[in-house]
Amino acid sequence: MRKLSKKLVVLVTMLTMIFGSAITVFASDAQDVSVDTANNYYFAGNDMKMDGGVYFGSFGAGQNLEMDSCTIDDVTCLAGMNITVRNTSIGSSLFAAGSTITFENNAIEGNVFAAGQSVNADSSVEAKSFTAVGQSVGFDGTAEAANIAAEEVIFNGRVTGDVTIEADTVTIGDDAVVTGTLKVISDQEPEIGSGSQINDVDFIKTISSEDGESQIVEKSIGFTILEKVKSAIYWSIAMILVGLIMCWLMKDSLDKSAEMLKSRTAIMLGTGAITLIAVPLAAIICMITFIGLPIGLVVAALYTITMCFSVAFTGASLGRLLFNKMPGLAGASLGILILEFAKKIPFLGGLIFLFSVIYTMGYVIQTLYLNRIKKQN
């Protein structure tokens, strides 16, 4: 598999571990279960099982998560090391990120988005579309479309539309049915079972360069669009996990930043723009001197971290503000999802990132300033 895909899989797994650990630390007795007034189910901890029940939405984080015989009307978001969803009906989309992800006998009216080392969906899984990224992915279910990227893919599902698979090795089982086009992007042709029903196979050969990267021999417009969509899915899942951490630990900051944008728009954004330019210069000046070197390094590190997570912070904050009729976590996740996909649009993506950095830095500096004024008074 391509180096980029490997790194992204590792990144998603690491974020999942951090997210699960953070939730576990801050949960009472390593377990936390609650249902809000909108009938959304929240659960977090080391070993958590959601056994039965009818809820509007569900959000879980931890080491080992299991959903069994549940009915969820809206979105389900899960992050953990080992995730199992079985005998469950979901009225909207399912988002899952972890190390080992297993889907068994699920009816999902929306889309499935999964990222992990191992992702498997059995033959009794039904979804609108199935998108998965991992080291190994197996899909035996039913969907209208499928997009899979992994080192090893075993496909034995039934898809009424198109299927796109990007992998080192691709095995198409005897029971596979693809009514649309099966597009395979690999350095070797897929192994297709004699009993499979495939109408059209579009094989795009890749070549491996000296540094181990794989390159497309001929890159079509469709493939370019697919790459952008996959990238958006990668980072959406990763940033949604970061956003959920922020909602858990920084709920007040997310809400206050949105309020500050409404009440102190010019000052907040102006401060952020000045900080964006001034901080790197100040860090460089500090690092020129021996005494100021540690301060410069710390400032540079904080500046970089703020930039990396600015889109997640901005999306979560504005999502909670704009979609205030939705549960807080759902609104934050939707806000991040919109920004991450919009970032892939040429020119607009750069503006979104720039605004996110200015927004985040402006809030941080203004908060520090206002707290200092309050203490002086």
Image (cartoon, grey):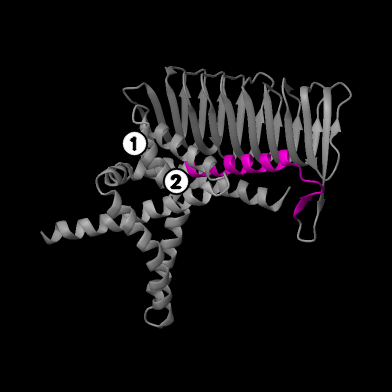
SS at mark 1 in the image: helix
Q: Nearer the viewer, residue 149 or 311?
A: 311
Marked residue nearer the N-terminal end (2 or 1): 2
Residue 21 placement (x, y as % from top left)? 45, 45
Q: Specify whether 287 is left or right of 346.
A: left
- Residue 366 visible in the snapshot: yes
Q: CA distance from mark 2 to mark 1?
A: 14 Å
Compared with 350, 226 (above or below) is above
Residue 283 placement (x, y as % from top left)? 41, 72
Q: Are marks 2 and 1 in contact (CB under 8 Å)?
A: no
Name the image quarter holding residue 36: top left
Neighbours of disc 2 within 10 Å: few (<14), some (14-19), many (20+): many
Compared with 217, 72 (above or below) is above
Neighbours of disc 1 within 10 Å: few (<14), some (14-19), many (20+): many
- Residue 51 magenta: no
Residue 23 placement (x, y as % from top left)? 41, 41
Check residue 312 in the rendering and tell me which mark sits there, or answer none: 2
Residues shaded magenta: 213-240
Check residue 33 in the rendering and tell me which mark sits there, or answer none: none
Q: Nearer the viewer, residue 101 or 216?
A: 216
Q: Specify whether 271 is left or right of 169.
A: left
Check residue 321 in the rendering and tell me which mark sits there, or answer none: 1
Amino acid on which the number 1 mark rests in the picture: Leu
Amino acid on which the number 2 mark rests in the picture: Ala
Q: Main secondary structure of the magenta part?
A: helix
Q: Nearer the viewer, residue 338 or 102?
A: 338
Residue 282 placement (x, y as % from top left)? 38, 72
- Residue 22 visible in the snapshot: no
| Residue shown at the point (76%, 24%) measured from the top left | 180
| Residue shown at the point (60%, 39%) measured from the top left | 115
| Quadrant location of the C terminus in the rendered image | bottom left
